[in-house]
DNA sequence: CAAGGTGTTCCGCTCAACGGAATTCAGGTT
DNA sequence: AACCTGAATTCCGTTGAGCGGAACACCTTG
């Protein structure tokens, strides 16, 4: 089972409560591991049974939910698979990285992740499981903290300069006691990443877990995302082997080239 | 660019127009290739500008949309990536098939697709691109016709018997003049698939395109989905090579085993 | 600097959508 | 077979969430 490395989804509110409800219902269905009954759903969302039922019916006609033929329970529908894929495609870095992920996994035996830099967030778009008995990984769709993850450090080092301001504006969350929380310390770490062209973040989010990331740049030299290896500290040490470093950076370089990036 | 093999999404209506609107807006954003302005969106959906704006704001707070910092345009947000992934995970066949897709692609050089049998639909969950210059494929999230695709024939042959009734209840759509449209013909084709353990569907959906599919079965011997190769008829002939057949069927068998299936 | 295009906010009105109650259905249990 | 129990579903009269026209602020562009 993959270790969860994602930051908690921020609960939010707005007017337009009806829209809010649609999203809460979608998320409830997506999180459920089995079909849910109307009553159950109504209770979970704090709404009346007729309301839940009406909404579910509206979900059904567009395939955002499906109804189990035997039990009558409701579960998440296939429309979301298509929609999620469309959303993912839009972040076109993934197309550039994908072809290099498989070989990277074969060569290292470790989990491989690809992330994109969207606004001032690092979003994990794809993951291939490693080959060890105990699996690590980050789920696609997770957002990674800029100061605590290897993906994030790469983004800070090679992404737009205002990223750093956005991060230091808020206090840095200490996921573990190894997480960088001091802005000065972070500046130095990022400078080092910029110099060496890759980042690690041993114990940054989860003790015992390390990642090794390298930036994917586009034709203008802007950082569009990153490729990373993820593994236990024993297989992916804080000082990674030359081989590991070279494999990751050359995968990232290859992906960058297919985005039109050219060295110097 | 991948050839589109998907059946057209059925437009649908229900009461609860507010829910409908949320979905139409999501789909519009997902389909767009660039950020859209409020006015543009309002026009496309046939609603007033304030309404569009209010809805978009509600989308923003939950990350179902994001606003481009420079232009102020709206585009699809990261929440959908996570949601789509969750939806996909739920169809657990994919976890069983995934590990065998990469090697299959390496061995054949063709595109590899994985599908699940959800209710009486075949849903494409994952695709790896082939290695030829011209790419074929089916987008994840697409639904395939049972009578016209290799995935579908496998589902008919190894899935629940009532599937066939569901299919023959409606007239069979002729995608090309090679598509099987006669129920009797379909019965015989399915019987053949059941005997040989794999299916092809040359020109079934698109002239010049063929697929070779084999079933993935669970611990009870029920068909849960399929793995398939997709390619041009010249690289994947109507009568596939022994090598191709063996590669696909053994990948499917391996996936079946990991779902608990045991031979005999 | 007016003219025409954006995005955004305000506010009074209205009908879409709500919830309580009634109804139907499925599956036990006596 | 009759009776229950707890589920899903439908009905319908009521009402406030959310609508749209109008106003506003902010850009370009001629």
Image (cartoon, coloured by chain):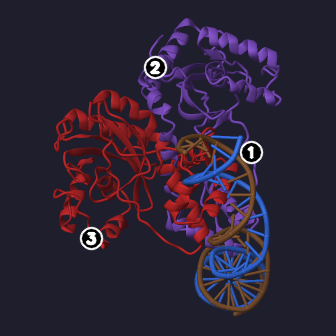
Chain colours: A red, B purple, C brown, D blue
The residue nearer to you, when weighing B207 against A137, is A137
Q: Which residue is mark 1?
A: B10
Q: Chain of mark 2?
A: B
Residue A257 location in percent, x, y? 43, 40
Q: Chain of mark 3?
A: A
Q: Which mark is residue A171?
A: 3
Residue B3 location in percent, x, y? 66, 33
Instruction: Confirm whether circles 3 and 1 share one chain.
Output: no
Q: Secondary structure at mark 1?
A: loop
- Residue B102 as seen in the image, left or right of residue B241: left
- Residue B19: name its quadrant: bottom right
Q: Secondary structure at mark 2?
A: loop
Q: Which residue is mark 2?
A: B261
Crowding near the residue tagged with mark 2, few <14, some 14–19, many ≥20 C-alpha atoms within 10 Å: some
- Residue B234 as seen in the image, left or right of residue C22: left
Instruction: Confirm whether circles 1 and 2 share one chain.
Output: yes
The residue nearer to you, when weighing A14 against A51, is A51
- Residue A209 as seen in the image, left or right of residue A262: left
Residue B167 in view, yes or no: yes
* Quadrant location, the N terminus of chain A: top left
Question: Image point 19% across, 45% down: which residue?
Answer: A208
As measured in the structure, the alpha-carbon distance from the residue carrying label 3 to the one carrying label 2 is 52 Å
| Mark 1 vs mark 2: in front | 2
Q: Chain of mark 1?
A: B
- Residue A175 as seen in the image, left or right of residue A32: left
Instruction: Check contact, mark 1 vs mark 2: CB within 8 A.
Output: no
Residue B12 location in percent, x, y? 75, 50
Residue A62 in view, yes or no: no
Crowding near the residue tagged with mark 1, few <14, some 14–19, many ≥20 C-alpha atoms within 10 Å: few
């Amino acid at each position: 089972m993959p270790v969860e490395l994602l930051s908690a989804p921020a609960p939010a509110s707005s007017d337009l409560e009806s829209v809010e409800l649609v999203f809460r219902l979608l998320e409830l269905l997506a999180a459920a591991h089995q079909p849910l009954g109307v009553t159950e759903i109504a209770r979970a969302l704090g709404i009346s049974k007729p309301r839940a039922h009406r909404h579910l019916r509206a979900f059904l006609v567009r395939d955002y939910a499906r109804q189990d033929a035997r039990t009558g329970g409701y579960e998440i529908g296939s429309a979301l698979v298509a929609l999620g894929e469309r959303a993912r495609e839009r972040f076109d870095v993934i197309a550039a990285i994908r072809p290099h992920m498989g070989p990277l996994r074969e060569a290292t035996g470790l989990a491989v992740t690809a992330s994109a830099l969207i606004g001032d967030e690092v979003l994990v778009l794809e993951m291939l499981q490693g080959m060890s008995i105990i699996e690590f990984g980050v789920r696609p769709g997770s957002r990674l903290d800029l100061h605590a993850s290897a993906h994030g450090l790469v983004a800070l080092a090679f992404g737009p300069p205002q990223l750093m301001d956005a991060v230091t504006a808020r206090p840095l969350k200490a996921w573990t006691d190894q997480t960088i929380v001091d802005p000065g310390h972070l500046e130095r770490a990022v400078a080092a990443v910029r110099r060496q062209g890759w980042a690690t973040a041993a114990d940054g989010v989860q003790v015992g877990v390390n990642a090794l990331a390298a930036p994917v740049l586009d034709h203008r030299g802007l950082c569009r995302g990153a490729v990373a290896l993820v593994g236990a500290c024993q297989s992916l040490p804080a000082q990674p082997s030359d081989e590991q470093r070279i494999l990751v950076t050359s995968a990232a370089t290859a992906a960058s080239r297919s985005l039109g990036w050219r060295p110097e």
